[in-house]
Amino acid sequence: MKRSPANTIDIYVVGKQWMWKIQHPEGKREINELHIPIGQPVQLTMASEDVIHSFYIPAFRTKKDVVPGRYTTLWFEANKLGEYHLFCAEYCGTQHSTMIGKVTVMEPDAYQNWLSGGIGGETMVQAGERQFQQLGCHTCHKEVSGGRGPSLVGVYGKPVQLDNGGTVTADEAYVRESILNPQAKIVHGFKPIMPTFQGQINEETLIQILTYIQSLGEAE
């Protein structure tokens, strides 16, 4: 049940006192609402900007904690059209009871029409690439070897050899840690010169950069 199917729609969620901020790969954003198509598996990658929250859709019998400092994932497939309640099921502060929303399950064609309406022209991958450039990441992490940092092309999901002789899989958690605490795991053959971006970028930007790095792997 923890392994999502290969054909999921990947949607990204950030919990924050006291709202759910949702990003679709195509660039569409929502607050306290989640639109999805019927009959299509959906995977949520979730993070918190402050305290522990819990993403809870009672009608789907599904709930998952959203924890600061890490990613959690949840997948489901809606099989009935309609609107369904969305709650935070973990007490998260004085306005916890207002952290509510709704999930709207739509016909696939209606979902595509909704998805294409009102988008600002920038997908999550494009936003991640823009942030990657603006933060100067490209000056060290070049597309070809020879940079001061390792190339990120094709690295996502692959084993990475570390300076201490160990290996780690370049997954969501590793990418996030490498951005916020780059000295934690040094890649073999490189010096520990990368600065931390802790406190400089928020969870939404982190997820955008993550999707960009994922796309580099897909493009290999």
Image (cartoon, rainbow, N blue to C red):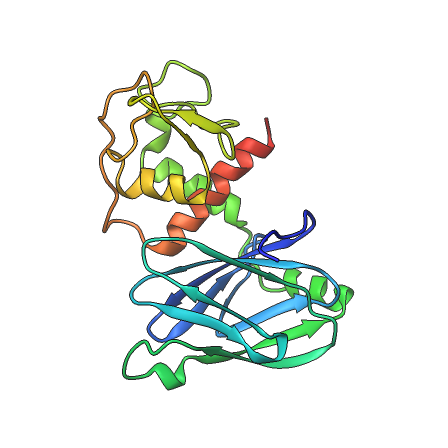
The vertical placement of 45 against 126, above or below, is below
The vertical placement of 67 against 154, above or below, is below
Q: Which of the two residues, 110 or 95, is positioned nearer the viewer here?
A: 95
Q: Which of the two residues, 105 or 135, is positioned nearer the viewer here?
A: 105
Residue at the spot x=70%, y=50% of the render? 7
The x, y position of residue 6, in whole percent, is 68, 47
Q: Is residue 112 left or right of residue 75?
A: right
Q: Quadrant of residue 196?
A: top left
Q: Which of the two residues, 208 or 44, is positioned nearer the viewer here?
A: 44
Residue that protrudes farthest toward the top in the picture: 146
- Report the quarter where the C terminus lies: top right
Q: Which of the two residues, 144 or 96, is positioned nearer the viewer here?
A: 96
Q: How many marks?
A: 0
Q: Is residue 124 left or right of residue 200?
A: right
The x, y position of residue 148, in whole percent, is 30, 19
The x, y position of residue 119, in whole percent, is 57, 59
Residue at the spot x=34%, y=67% of the render? 52
Residue that protrudes farthest toward the bottom in the picture: 97
Residue at the spot x=32%, y=59% of the render? 68
Residue at the spot x=50%, y=44% of the render? 211
Q: Quadrant of residue 95?
A: bottom left
The x, y position of residue 128, in whole percent, is 45, 44
Q: Quadrant of residue 136?
A: top left
Q: Is residue 213 left or right of residue 81?
A: left
- Report the quarter where the N terminus lies: bottom right
